[in-house]
Image (cartoon, rainbow, N blue to C red):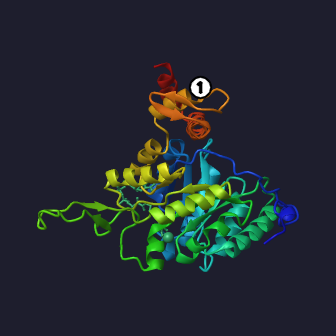
Amino acid sequence: MRAPKDFFRPLAVGAPTPVREVPFRPSRMIHFFDPGNEKMAAKIPVIAPTVDVLLGNLEDAVAADRKEAARDGLVKIARATDFGDTQLWTRINSLDSPWVLDDLLTLVTEIGDKLDVIMVPKVEGAADIHYIDRLLAQLEAKAGVRRPILVHAILETATGVAGVEEIAGASPRMQGVSLGPADLAASRRMKTTRVGGGHPGYLVRQDPDTQDADAPRATYQQDLWHYTLARMVDACAAHGILPYYGPFGDIKDTTACEDQFRNAFLLGCVGAWSLHPVQIGIAKKVFSPSPDEVRWARRVIEAMGDGTGAVMLDGKMQDDATFKQCQVVVELAEALAARDPELRAAYDAAGEE
Ligand SMILES: CC(C)(COP(=O)(O)OP(=O)(O)OC[C@H]1O[C@@H](n2cnc3c(N)ncnc32)[C@H](O)[C@@H]1OP(=O)(O)O)[C@@H](O)C(=O)NCCC(=O)NCCSC(=O)C[C@](C)(O)C(=O)O
Ligand SMILES: [Mg+2]
């Protein structure tokens, strides 16, 4: 652990100065693609303007004999594409893999100026982030990268969850954390074989009818990920970084995907991953506050004046705390609308009603 006064010092001579605050840039969907897959790569110029974040994936889902093709493909795509204000991220291979060192050496020196965030899988504790932090500083200095590349951790081992607070605060580079429900399930020996989402066996059952013991009893499916997600959100909020739901693997079940994303949004997450083009629109819809919500939040802020005291609005008590809740909604809406003209129009129209 560095002394507080050294926390924001560059970790290598010539490396850019670390950021003091994580810039809030819209990241409702982190769209995954395999840069070595020609069919997917061909779609990138068209997909880029429709997503907040494009992520060239080098880790799981890229076969061992395609690792180099994926890495080289990402360099090629990053050089050839103008991403506008869409962010470019990558997911490198895990720190114990034979590929990660070359991933970092190649990507930072070849396309370091184009990469906004590096996602690190299977992070187990602050030591993993410290390793990446120093190496990135050395590589940034070597390559003359002008602004620091940020780091995003995936929470996908039991050890990682147990240390999520120290991971979130390990470096000024920390941009955010995502849930990795598949590896995490395996690490914990959970008995779900799904990538995120619920499970019909994880439920609570209504009490028996005292008059009729044989009467049918309703069951209610529960959220397997609630504890982890809530803990992750707290760790991120406490350290001023951003929490994300991760992937939802049942591509065809767009309804359950939307539900899972919405739970994460309501709990504090700013986005989720899209693994397939069909999930882009779902994330966009879910992680943008609805125009009605924004209109209501604006009304509360207006009614609250300087933000202190208590007033009634449509039968509901408003005070200093609800003022802050509404600011969260309005500030998010403004940040999203600044790069999404459709949303801008929807929020403006809601304001005129
Ligand atoms: C699911 C798959 C196999 C279905 O791929 P498909 O080709 O069978 O699907 P399709 O519906 O037939 O695709 C239609 C068209 O869209 C294209 N396409 C399809 N997907 C994409 C995409 N993402 N981006 C851009 N284009 C895409 C695809 O190539 C095809 O093009 P075509 O019309 O020219 O034939 C495919 O979508 C895919 O490989 N997606 C990415 C998977 C991935 O990145 N997985 C890793 C993240 S999840 C994870 O790692 C877990 C975690 C966190 O680590 C942990 O919980 O532990
Ligand atoms: Mg994983």
Count numbered badges in the picture. Answer: 1
Q: In what quadrant of the picture does the N terminus appear? A: bottom right
110, above or below 51, in the image: below
Estimate the x, y position of residue 40 in percent, counting from the top left. 46, 56
SS at mark 1 in the image: helix
State the residue lying farthest toward the front. Answer: 211
Q: Nearer the viewer, residue 68 or 49?
A: 49
Q: Position of residue 317 (x, y in %)?
A: 51, 34
| Residue holding disc 1 | 302
Q: Residue drawn at (49%, 58%), measured in percent from left and top?
A: 245
From what the image shows, is residue 269 above or below residue 68? above
Q: Position of residue 246 (x, y in %)?
A: 49, 60
Q: Quadrant of ligand 1?
A: bottom left
Does residue 160 appear in the picture of this structure? yes
Q: If the image is split into quadrants, where does the C terminus sit?
A: top left
Badge 1 crowding class, 10 Å Cα cut-off, few under 14, some 14 to 19, many 20 or more, is: few
Q: Quadrant of residue 192?
A: bottom left
Q: What kind of residue is marked 1? A: Glu
Mark 1 CB lies closer than 8 A to ligand 1: no
